[in-house]
Image (cartoon, rainbow, N blue to C red):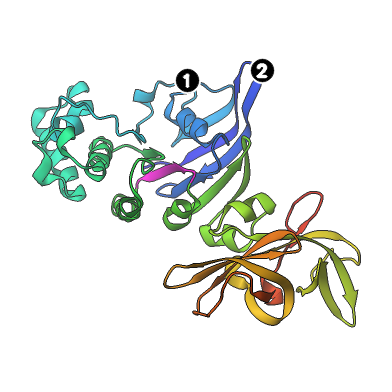
Amino acid sequence: MAEVRISGLRKSYGALEVLHGIDVDINDGEFVVLVGPSGCGKSTLLRMVAGLEGVTGGTIRIGDRIVNNLPPADRDIAMVFQNYALYPHKTVAKNMGFSLRMRGMDKAEIAGRVERAAEILGLTPYLDRYPRALSGGQRQRVAMGRAIVRDPQVFLFDEPLSNLDAKLRVQMRTEIRELHQRLKTTTIYVTHDQIEAMTMADRIVVMQGGNIEQVGTPLDVYDAPANTFVAGFIGSPSMNMLDGVVRRGDGAVVVEVPGARLPVTDREGLEEGREVVAGIRPEHLQISGDGLPGTIAVVEPTGSETHLVVRADGREVVTLLRERQRLSPGQEVRLASAPEHVHLFDRQSRARIS
């Protein structure tokens, strides 16, 4: 295992710069997830750590070595790809042990490592099968086994669950997390799925446009997003955003939005007339006798909860109700939230007002 230190990392393709000075430290044994929309630079960053992309500027340190100019084979990392990258003409056992054979390792040692990895991943009954005889989840386990047998300092995962169906993704999320808890190997995991990030990570690195927007534990990022991008990206359904103006009077502070005045907790910088964005997560909006007026557009019952899409002053507001209620499209409602659940962001900078 090893720490990974990334300092001032830049990547350019000609005149186009796609990473703009990335700084992030990943602790020994930590599971860190890089998350962001397509094209934000997360996979490029991972491939640079792996040595599959060159470094334009900055440094990558794995353990006590700067690895900028080292080839992938000398970095003591193992990577699991989205498409499994298995050899179709080799058995599971030979796929898992291939890199060790290329190193010239003793056959008995290879067999022992493969057997141990197969036991960890539940692949023992499949060691003599070929990839074509395996399910998608089993193939992904083989790809993980191929990484485990190398006993690397760092595991790199590049969207490994993207090709799996929804039920299998949930299962594999659990298996990868349990694997990490067992092996304690430093892990960097790339995904565009914020649910994967929230459920798997020790810490999340949220990226956009080649920059890091926020680094923190899943709950820190969820409860205190640094800006409106993070607030809207992390969480499903997304946070509702309402443009408003701060109003003060009679010892109370509210944000005035079209059709309503939302009570908020007082904090530094909330001067009268300041233009802000009020953010409210769907689970913190409830139907009330007072609040934001709107008309129900869509009712989506999921069994344990109900999602409502409410049209309020020309915009859609989503709320999530834990208790079942008889509601129907076209019904007039009002939505309210407790003051402590209203996040505030500056309208111009989009940064959080703490």
**x 51%, y 30%: residue:** 44
Q: Is residue 336 visible?
A: no
| 155 is within the stretch colored magenta | no
Position of 268 with respect to 328 (left or right) is right
Which residue lies under the disc numbered 1?
69
Please provide percent x and percent y for residue 77: 36, 33
**Amino acid type assigned to the residue bearing label 1 in the image:** Asn
| 186 is within the stretch colored magenta | yes
Q: Secondary structure at mark 2?
A: loop
Q: Main secondary structure of the magenta part?
A: strand
Quarter of the image that includes the N terminus:
top left
Q: Secondary structure at mark 1?
A: loop
**x 43%, y 24%: residue:** 52
Please provide percent x and percent y for residue 62: 45, 35
Residue 149 or residue 349, whichever sits in front: 349
Give the quarter of the image for residue 116: top left
Give the quarter of the image for residue 200: bottom left
Q: Residue furthest top?
A: 14
- Assess disc 2: are there few (<14), some (14-19) or many (≥20) residues with their C-alpha within 10 Å of its C-alpha: few
* Mark identifier at residue 161: none
Quarter of the image that includes the C terminus:
bottom right
Which residue lies under the disc numbered 2?
15
Query: Which is more foreground, mark 1 or mark 2?
Result: 2
Please provide percent x and percent y for residue 194: 50, 51
Q: Which residues are magenta?
A: 185-192
